[in-house]
Amino acid sequence: MENDSSINPLDAIFAPKSVAVIGASTTPGKVGHDIFVNILKGGYNGTLYPINPSARSISSVRAYKSLTEIPDEIDLGIVILPPKAALQSVQEAVAKGVKGIVIVSAGFREIGSEGRAIEDRLVATCREAGVRLIGPNCLGVINPLPAVQLNASFSARMPKAGNVSFISQSGALCTAVLDFAADRNFGFSKFISIGNKADVDELDLLRYLHQDHDTEVILIYVEELRRGPEFIEAVKEITCGDYRPKPVLVIKSGRTSAGAQAAASHTGSLAGTEGVYDAIFVQSGIIRVASIDELFDFATAFAYKNESELGKMRRKVPAGNRVAIVTNAGGPGIVATDMTMFSGLQLAKFKDETLETLASHLPSTANLHNPVDIIGDASIDRYENALGAVIRDEGVDGALVILTPQSMTDVLGTAEAIARIARKSFKPIMCCFMGVIDVSHGVKYLQEHGIPVYRFPENAAKAFGALYRYSNWLNRQHLAQYNLKFDRERAAKIIQDCLARGKNRIGELDGIGILESYGFKVLPTRLATTGDEAAAIAAEMGFPVVMKIVSEQILHKSDAGGVIVGLATAAEVKEAFDTILTRARGYKPDAQIEGVLVQKMASAGTEVIMGLNRYPIFGPLLMFGSGGIFVEVFQDVTFRLAPIGRNEARRMVREIKGYKLLQGFRGKAKGDIESIEKCLVSLSNMAMNHPEIVELDINPLLVHAEGQAATAADCRMILKTPGGDPTPAH
């Protein structure tokens, strides 16, 4: 059901009928002057009022001493005043009935407690009155569409109108992006700098732009998010819901693993906040890009639409990853082929009918197979016939057309021919017109007709790959959820008993009980305090056995030489007991050693790891990957925020490189993949049901042959002490 966006409170900010600039200045170069002039010279279609108590006019427009002097209603107030004066002005604006506010000026939460207190009062005042606030400490907002033409920012550049909206936490980045967009003839529907996000944040704007009929693609620059699971569920509706799904592309600053190294678990040391953000983006269907350049490359592809038979515009996304390449130069065709493979695509294999059609139109020297090389002297007809033939092939999901200008090349005519074919096809067609001056007329024509065109083949191939990933997201299958049963009460009792004993680092003895409560297959395990006791336990449970050191101060047992496997006799067990104690005391002399664990040795299996690490705001972050002693060397892992169900678990398993090993590799039996998925769902439930668990590793989880389940061979957990910080130190 379509919502009526005309009653959205944010309309007063993005499509106001009247604007008051509170703090307008007569001095060129001051923000208050420049913003007012930018609105005035930008051709704003509403009524503009400058507010300045000591000026008669600003840029020949009559000035008012205060908002109360203005006889008319005001939709939007732009505030450019120091914090205390800004608070007073906002109070006056609310009393006046102003419907939306943008505070450009700085000096609020970013400078300390005093500024934070004023910012909090601003927000409280606005929320009590139902007025939405953008900022403070932001560049402003821009709506370049002809019906509004509002440049309420201190960027002098009014961008071209388009169907892409941009949200940025950084004002400085906004000006650079506007310059970049102008150079690429790129247009916007809305352009927003959100600054401190005191009231309106990314999620508010994403919801608004989802309903906005003038926005087809949403771009975001993020430094930090303040919402987790709620963000995922809301954005998932935007990217793939029933109502007008829209692609969301994000560029995030600070892509490092900083802050993760001090964690006690493998999960914590590998995750960091970037693991959290990667999980949020993947789970919500947001496409993460690596650079500003890539952001615009992808946005150009996603904005590409075609008119359907019903007269509605339809986004062009490929049904599959089979791409056809048409080129008039061999070298760029090879580059495109390489980049196509790198971007998750494959070269389409043409049907015999397609090859016959190509042969009838192309010279004998042309290459008819993909990539189709139509030779350097290619005419318009050659391009049109070749592209038309391959795009009609049922085995082709889209095409990449490469043109390198030769002396005989009709660049504009070729662009027109490509546009003619593109209008008839729902398959995406990307273009690469290599060069700058010689191809400029053709490039301009393609841009004006909404056809993505790039300077280099690799840019086009990456953009096509992003379209394919989004198509996969839209068309992904949804399996029925698992109906798993858990003994939540038993797990809670074990956790509370440990905490009551002052124990917040849990090894296998207690951890096995918790895992067993959540359906994990575990091994017979008992603690021995002497070599003789260990030998007796081993004989009772049956050889071979594994022995492991038990000490709260030695979490990573292998590092201390505290694990010995494959013990087959009582004598070997006794000797191993003494060896493990000696090694442990040498590794950490002050460690309190409880004894040595004797565990039935599991049958062979592929080693994987799963775990969790709990974060403020975002909650438990789950990890899955290739396990064993090399987990931090290869770092073949993926992350999701809990809760997850069967489908998300399924995608996690298939994302890691080690998935090939689980499928059966070089004669090895296929692993029990479904059991891994069930374990991940169980782990998610454990994380949600027991907030006391702040870090957890199951490493290795041994995955046996299909139908034989998976065994948790080792685990460790860290609990939050009562009244303690729920987040492990990083």
Image (cartoon, rainbow, N blue to C red):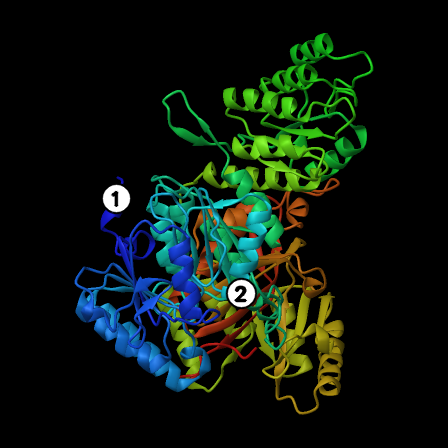
Residue at (67% x, 66% y) in the render: 545
Q: Which residue is mark 2?
A: 172
Measure the C-alpha gap from mark 2 to mark 1: 34 Å
Image location (x, y in percent) of residue 355: 70, 13
Asked whether residue 344 is in view, the answer is no
Q: Is residue 181 above or below residue 457?
A: below
Which type of secondary structure does the marked residue at label 2 adopt? helix
Q: Which residue is mark 1?
A: 3
Taking 505 as reference, is 132 left or right? Answer: left
Image location (x, y in percent) of residue 604: 68, 54
Taking 206 as reference, is 4 left or right? Answer: left
Q: Residue furthest right?
A: 365
Q: Is residue 373 above or below residue 385?
A: below
Placement of the N terminus among the 4 image quadrants: top left
Q: Which of the marked residues, 2 or 1, is nearer the chain's N terminus?
A: 1
Task: Mark 2 vs mark 1: give the one in front.
Answer: 2
Q: Is residue 279 above or below residue 598?
A: above
In front: 538, or 121?
121
Which type of secondary structure does the marked residue at label 1 adopt? loop
Crowding near pointer 1: few (<14 within 10 Å), some, many (20+)?
few
Res 85 → quadrant: bottom left
Res 368 → quadrant: top right
Mark carried by residue 64: none
Placement of the C terminus among the 4 image quadrants: bottom right
